[in-house]
């Protein structure tokens, strides 16, 4: 099949009977360490990946939008800037409407667009296809309406759109990484002051993602629950967020705090420490330490956040037996598995997953060998 840019160009012509002005793309992302920390104003280490959502776009002179996606063929979705209406329904175009609604709420204006969306970021697979869609759209609007928004401003509008307008309580990480990723690098992000730094991933490592054997719907429910539990724990300590909780303060409250909330808070506090350590390990090129921190992050998600499932545990076990201390492996985004491994082990890890995935999960694996990629931008037609 042709690449997403070619497909977007063709889909645009087929739908609107004319050529698009320009193409824009935004990547998916994967979290290396820092799970459920972004909405707690903590730290994240994550990379944009070389799977993209591409939008072919043509500016309009009015403020109307007409959008089509290859994944939902035959539907042309239309709306007017500033009159997006209620965005509660589970409809793909709401991710775009959420963006324009967030713009209107911030007092911004934009011209309309005709646009065609094509993507090779799998949906609901832990790689944030939603952020890739929002950021590709925001990047297209920014360029075609000459808004002069920074990548950070686009990320903030996208996050506001998804969380406040659509009601999916996401943090800022997905959008920041999709907007600001750098080739061969992971970003370490401080989600309190929105500071980020790009750290080179050593050449000797492969980035591998294994598709989820789990139901994404159940995972989304667990995500909301954990988010609420974190807020309850922060409320107990009278804090805005768990970012401000010290380990000693948490330990000294153990007897008084509900045991589930205690474990949730312990994951967040320890995950923030691990993420910062992982950033330093990456800077030093210390693969052993980075791998260990990824493995510990997995254990904390399993034990303190109670998010793992037997199928995930078995797969992580199979992979970590091959990887040993030459990389790390963990579940991520509630459903899939990410591994960073020395190149020489890549084939052995892939083989182990291929041999065991079906028996352990009843499904077929999708194994993505990725590269850390650059963030959103305009691309050549
Ligand atoms: P993810 O982890 O992939 O972000 P989400 O449930 O947050 O999972 O977002 C997936 C949703 O985003 C899809 O159900 C769809 O509504 C929308 N989406 C993502 N990519 C596309 C696309 N290429 N075309 C249309 N809608 C998309
Ligand atoms: Mg998403």
Image (cartoon, grey):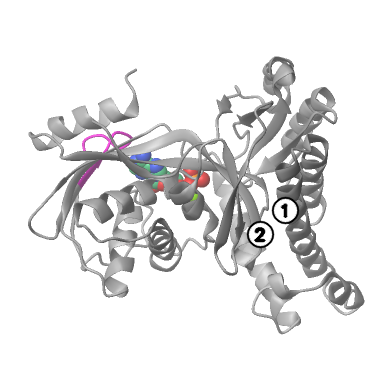
Specify the label residue 347 is tagged with.
Answer: none
Query: At 54% from the left edge and 61% from the top edge, which residue is drawn?
Result: 171
- Of residue 76 and residue 338, the one placed in the foreground of this image is 338
On screen, 58 above or below 170? above
Q: Is residue 156 left or right of residue 194?
A: left
Q: Provide residue 197's location: percent of width, then percent of height.
A: 59, 53
Q: Is residue 93 visible?
A: no
Q: Earlier in the sequence, mark 1 or mark 2?
A: 2
The residue segment tinted magenta is: 67-74
- Of residue 130 and residue 55, the one placed in the foreground of this image is 55
Q: Is residue 297 visible?
A: yes
Q: Is residue 210 left or right of residue 321?
A: left
State whether label 2 is within 8 Å of ligand 2.
no
Specify the label residue 43 is tagged with.
Answer: 2
Based on the displayed image, in which of its 4 quarters is residue 103 positioned? bottom left
Q: Is residue 178 left or right of residue 20?
A: right
10 Å crowding of disc 1: few (<14), some (14-19), many (20+): many
**Badges 1 and 2: C-beta atoms under 8 Å apart?**
yes
Picture quarter with ligand 1: top left
Callout count:
2
State whether label 1 is within 8 Å of ligand 1.
no
What residue does disc 1 label? 275
Secondary structure under the numbered disc 1 in the rendered image = helix
Residue 89 falls within the magenta-colored stretch: no
Secondary structure under the numbered disc 2 in the rendered image = strand
In the picture, which quadrant includes the N terminus? top left
Task: Give me the C-alpha separation between circle 1 and circle 2.
Answer: 6 Å
Q: Provide residue 174's location: percent of width, then percent of height.
A: 51, 52
Q: Residue furthest front?
A: 284
């Amino acid at each position: 099949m042709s690449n997403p840019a070619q497909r977007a160009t063709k889909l645009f012509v087929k739908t609107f009977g004319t050529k698009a002005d320009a193409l824009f793309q935004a990547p998916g992302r994967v979290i290396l360490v820092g799970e459920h920390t972004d909405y707690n104003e903590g730290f994240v280490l994550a990379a944009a990946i070389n799977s993209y959502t591409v939008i072919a776009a043509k500016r309009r002179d009015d403020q109307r939008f007409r959008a089509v996606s290859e994944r939902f063929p035959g539907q042309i979705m239309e709306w007017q800037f500033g009159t997006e209406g209620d965005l509660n329904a589970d409809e793909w175009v709401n991710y775009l409407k959420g963006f324009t609604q967030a713009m209107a709420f911030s007092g911004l204006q934009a011209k309309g667009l005709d646009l065609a969306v094509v993507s090779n970021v799998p949906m609901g697979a832990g790689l944030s296809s939603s952020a890739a869609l929002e950021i590709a759209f925001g990047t297209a609007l920014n360029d075609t309406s000459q808004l002069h928004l920074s990548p950070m401003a686009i990320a903030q509008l996208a996050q506001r759109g998804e969380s406040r307008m659509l009601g999916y309580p996401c943090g800022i990480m997905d959008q920041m990484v999709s907007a600001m990723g750098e080739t061969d690098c992971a970003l370490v992000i401080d989600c309190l002051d929105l500071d980020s730094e790009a750290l080179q991933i050593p050449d000797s490592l492969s980035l591998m993602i294994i598709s989820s054997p789990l139901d994404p719907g159940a995972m989304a429910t667990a995500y909301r629950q954990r988010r609420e539990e974190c807020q309850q724990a922060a409320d107990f300590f009278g804090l805005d967020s768990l970012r401000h909780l010290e380990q000693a303060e948490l330990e000294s409250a153990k007897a008084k705090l509900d045991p589930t909330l205690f474990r949730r808070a312990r994951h967040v506090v320890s995950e923030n420490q691990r993420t910062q350590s992982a950033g330093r390990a990456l800077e030093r090129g210390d693969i052993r330490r980075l791998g260990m921190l990824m493995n510990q992050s997995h254990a904390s998600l399993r034990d303190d956040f109670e998010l793992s499932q037997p199928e995930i545990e078995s797969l992580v076990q199979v992979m970590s037996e091959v990887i040993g201390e030459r990389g790390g492996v963990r579940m991520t985004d509630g459903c899939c598995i990410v591994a960073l491994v020395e190149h020489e082990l890549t084939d052995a890890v892939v083989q182990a997953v291929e041999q065991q995935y079906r028996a352990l999960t009843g499904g077929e694996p999708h194994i993505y060998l990725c590269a850390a990629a650059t963030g959103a931008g305009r691309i050549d037609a």
